[in-house]
């Protein structure tokens, strides 16, 4: 497994996505809003940014499988092959914040799975130019530099009663609480700026990139029962 080569490609793909995001962020009039999954907004920037990532990956690794939130599967027929790499992409996590220019509380997520486990993850904030990259066995870097890692960041789980009970139990035990922030708070968690992040009802492309980043900084990512997510 060529981890260094794969990590280099992750950075190259994030660069391509970030270029598209910055182009649209600087000119909101160019947005073409559409609805996705009922009331979730999406823009032409999402699709173009994801296409940029896919192009970079397939240029270097044409037979690897990719699943993107906007464009779906690429090389899906190869996803179940032994020793296959599968990429999970979210070109703009936190699209409402992106459209509303809400404190840059959005980011790029690129995850790579091998043998069913996330091995590389990237969280990128293209406006602030912050990038966390975690690789299995290599630790986590921020903007290419290694680091070592209370405030607790909670995303309010309003999806079901069980999640709400778990949230209430935790909230009573912590000090100061903050809310929302999308993928960027997981980069802050890896950096040691917050101690706990709580979230729920995530799709694979929403969390696969987060696991290597947090774990590479010495953190732990589990489900509500304390089990590994994948």
Image (spheres, helix red, strand yellow):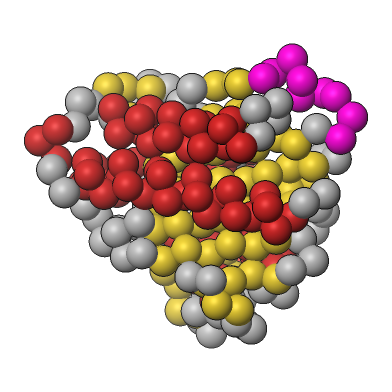
Q: Quadrant of residue 195?
A: bottom right
Q: Is residue 48 visible?
A: yes
Residue at (43% x, 29% y) in the render = 51
Does 33 sit left or right of 70 as displayed?
A: left
Q: Which residues are magenta?
A: 75-83
> Residue shown at 14%/33% (left/top)?
30
Left or right of 123 in this view: 106: left
Residue 136 at x, y percent in the picture: 76, 61
* Vertical order, 12 against 95 (above or below): below
Front one among 177 and 90: 90
Residue 109 in view (yes/no): no
Towards the viewer: 70 or 171: 70
Q: Residue furthest right?
A: 82
Left or right of residue 206: residue 136: right
Name the quadrant containing residue 210: bottom right
**Residue shown at 62% from the left, 46% from the top:** 111
Q: Position of residue 100 (x, y in %)?
A: 21, 47
Q: Main secondary structure of the magenta part?
A: loop
Height in image: 124 above or below 170? Answer: above
Q: Is residue 89 above or below residue 131?
A: above
Q: Position of residue 91 (x, y in %)?
A: 44, 40
**Residue 82 falls inside the magenta stretch:** yes
**Depth check, front residue: 142 or 104:** 142
């Amino acid at each position: 497994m060529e981890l260094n080569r794969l990590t280099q490609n992750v950075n190259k793909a994030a660069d391509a996505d970030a270029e598209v995001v910055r182009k649209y962020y600087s000119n909101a009039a160019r947005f073409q809003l559409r609805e996705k999954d009922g009331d979730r907004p999406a823009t032409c920037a999402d699709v173009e940014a994801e296409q940029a990532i896919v192009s970079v990956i397939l240029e270097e690794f044409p037979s690897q499988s990719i699943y993107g939130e906007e464009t779906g599967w690429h090389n899906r027929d190869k996803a179940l092959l032994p020793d296959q790499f599968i990429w999970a992409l979210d070109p703009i996590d936190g699209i409402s914040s992106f459209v509303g220019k809400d404190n840059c509380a959005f980011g790029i997520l690129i995850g790579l799975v091998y043998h069913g486990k996330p091995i590389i993850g990237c969280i990128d904030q293209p406006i602030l130019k912050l990038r966390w990259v975690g690789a299995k066995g290599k630790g986590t870097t921020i903007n290419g530099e290694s680091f070592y890692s209370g405030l607790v960041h909670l995303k309010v789980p309003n999806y079901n009663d069980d999640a709400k009970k778990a949230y209430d139990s935790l909230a009573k035990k912590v000090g100061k609480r903050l809310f929302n922030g999308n993928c960027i708070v997981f980069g802050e968690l890896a950096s040691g700026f917050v101690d706990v992040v709580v979230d729920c009802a995530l799709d694979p492309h929403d969390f696969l990139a987060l696991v290597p980043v947090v774990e590479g900084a010495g953190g732990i990512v589990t489900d509500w029962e304390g089990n590994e997510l994948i």
